Amino acid sequence: MAGRALLSVVVGLLILNIALTGNSYAPQITDILADKVVLEALGTAWKESFAQNPISYQVRGGWIYADAHKYIVVQHASKDHSPQGVDEDIDLDNPEKVVVLSSEDCKLVADFHTHPFADKTQQRVDSDEIKRAYEKGVPGIVVSCSGVSYYGPERRASMDGPTGYPQSSGEAYNGQKDVKFDDNKYIAQGQCNP
């Protein structure tokens, strides 16, 4: 009888703690990729990669934020981060503030960018990008002709800490590869070589 009472008290305190402090775990990358807002943002970034010219490209990307209740907001990079058809890189190291939520309410949980290159060898995420995701402390997402892939840690380690990159994932890079999540449903005809 005393054991049941103690168990009830412990469970009650745990529920109260979660209610008062929220869930300090960030969403997993598979949960992020299942979100309609994120999928729409990936499609928009892909389309904008070819906005000026269907045979030329510009890498596009941005940041994905969530609050303690797992409400997800996507912030596209508001300025061009690479020249049209020239640079095959994007700098996402300085996240832009979320325009919908206050900075105290949300944390960066992933970033994303496109690989709009027709050459199949340039569509995969390279080891430097994967290492950088572990250093930043959040998973990365890439959209290419090959599909939508993710890389880096499975999730941000905690919703505590800075709004931007936590700079540590709690996981180490040990030669991990990117993981294909799904086919690219946003490909327009002529953007990718067969």
Image (cartoon, helix red, strand yellow):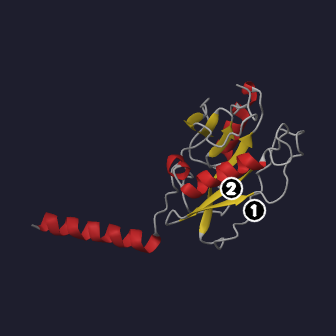
Along the line of sight, which residue is nearer the eye, 160 or 151?
Answer: 151
Give how far across and how far down residue 18 sits, in percent.
40, 68
Q: Quadrant of residue 165?
A: bottom right
Q: Is residue 18 left or right of residue 154?
A: left
Q: Amino acid at mark 1?
A: Glu
* Residue found at x 76% / y 51%: 92
Question: Which residue does the numbered mark 2 point to in the structure image?
Answer: 63
Q: Secondary structure at mark 1?
A: loop
Q: Quadrant of the C terminus?
A: top right
Residue 167 seen: no
> Relative to 126, does residue 99 appear above or below in the rendering?
below
Give how far across and how far down residue 50 sits, in percent.
80, 44
Give how far across and how far down residue 140 sits, in percent.
64, 45
Q: Are marks 2 and 1 in contact (CB under 8 Å)?
A: yes
Residue placed furthest toward the front: 189
Q: CA distance from mark 2 to mark 1?
A: 8 Å
**Residue count near mark 2 (Cα–Cα under 10 Å), binned few <14, some 14–19, many ≥20:** many
Residue placed furthest toward the left: 1
In the rendered structure, which disc, 2 or 1, sits on the residue that comes first in sequence?
A: 2
Q: Quadrant of residue 108?
A: bottom right
Along the line of sight, which residue is nearer the eye, 157 or 3?
Answer: 157
Q: Amino acid at mark 2?
A: Trp
**Residue count near mark 1 (Cα–Cα under 10 Å), binned few <14, some 14–19, many ≥20:** some
> Relative to 117, does residue 84 appear above or below in the rendering?
below
Question: Which residue does the numbered mark 1 point to in the structure image?
Answer: 96
* Residue found at x 78% / y 45%: 49
Q: Quadrant of the N terminus?
A: bottom left
Q: Is residue 155 left or right of residue 23?
A: right
